[in-house]
Amino acid sequence: MTIPAETLNNLWQVYYYIALFSTILFVLKLLLFNLFGGGSEVFADFNMEIDTDPSFNFFSVQSILAFFMGFGWTGYAGLKQIGFSHLMSFGMALAVGFLFMAVTALLLFSIKKLEKNIKKDRTTALEHIGKAYTNFEPNGSGQVEIEINGQLSVANATNTTDEEIKAFDFVKAVKVTDDMIYIEKVSNNKEK
């Protein structure tokens, strides 16, 4: 069965407009992702909680746009530029579209895995020496710079003694409850 020339002319135009429209949208989404941090894009595509493993979401907005972009440009090139038959162009367009979709979904999945937030376990600061980040009144609150989960962090803390602790004085974490670090000044202002 042969497709009339007029219909074939219309088919490459359909591929062309699908490709053009999806490419423009794909590029706009990438620009918005880069300009505004992409938080909404990634969360809209994956819709996940912070503490769970990211699931592979094949059908995101970005991957569907990638499908139509690959589908359209391959179909257009097959019909208009290379001169393939309609059936062969359509088959190649589908294959390339699904390839674009899979690669885009895989990239978004990889990006989401990099964004994983780790909750810091403040109990790892117990018995560590750090520095007062702010001044502490006797039995008052402030912030300390201390090692938590093997990383130097600034955290809220409470002075457990009746003496004032000045900023940059060495302190020791003596107790941790409800994510609050309780500290006392290290004697002679020297790190033990």
Image: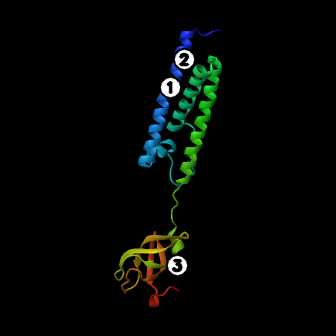
Residue at x-position 49% and y-position 31%: 22
Label 2: which secondary element? helix
The disc placed on residue 11 is: 2
Mark 1 surroundings: few (<14), some (14-19) or many (≥20) residues within 10 A: many
Task: Give the image location of residue 128, x and y in percent.
Answer: 52, 78
The disc placed on residue 191 is: none
* Callout in the foreground (3, 1): 1
Task: Give the image location of residue 73, x and y in percent.
Answer: 56, 28
Task: Give the image location of residue 23, x and y in percent.
Answer: 49, 33
Q: Earlier in the sequence, mark 3 or mark 1?
A: 1
Residue designated by label 3: 128
70 sits to left or right of 35: right
Q: Earlier in the sequence, mark 1 or mark 2?
A: 2
Residue designated by label 1: 18
Against 126, is 110 above or below? above
Against 72, is 165 above or below? below
| Residue type indicated by callout 3 | His
Residue 169 vs residue 55, the one in the foreground: 169
Against 9, is 127 above or below? below
| Residue type indicated by callout 1 | Ile
Q: How far apart are the alpha carbons under marks 3 and 1?
A: 61 Å
Residue at x-position 42% and y-position 47%: 35
* The quarter of the displayed image where residue 157 is located: bottom left
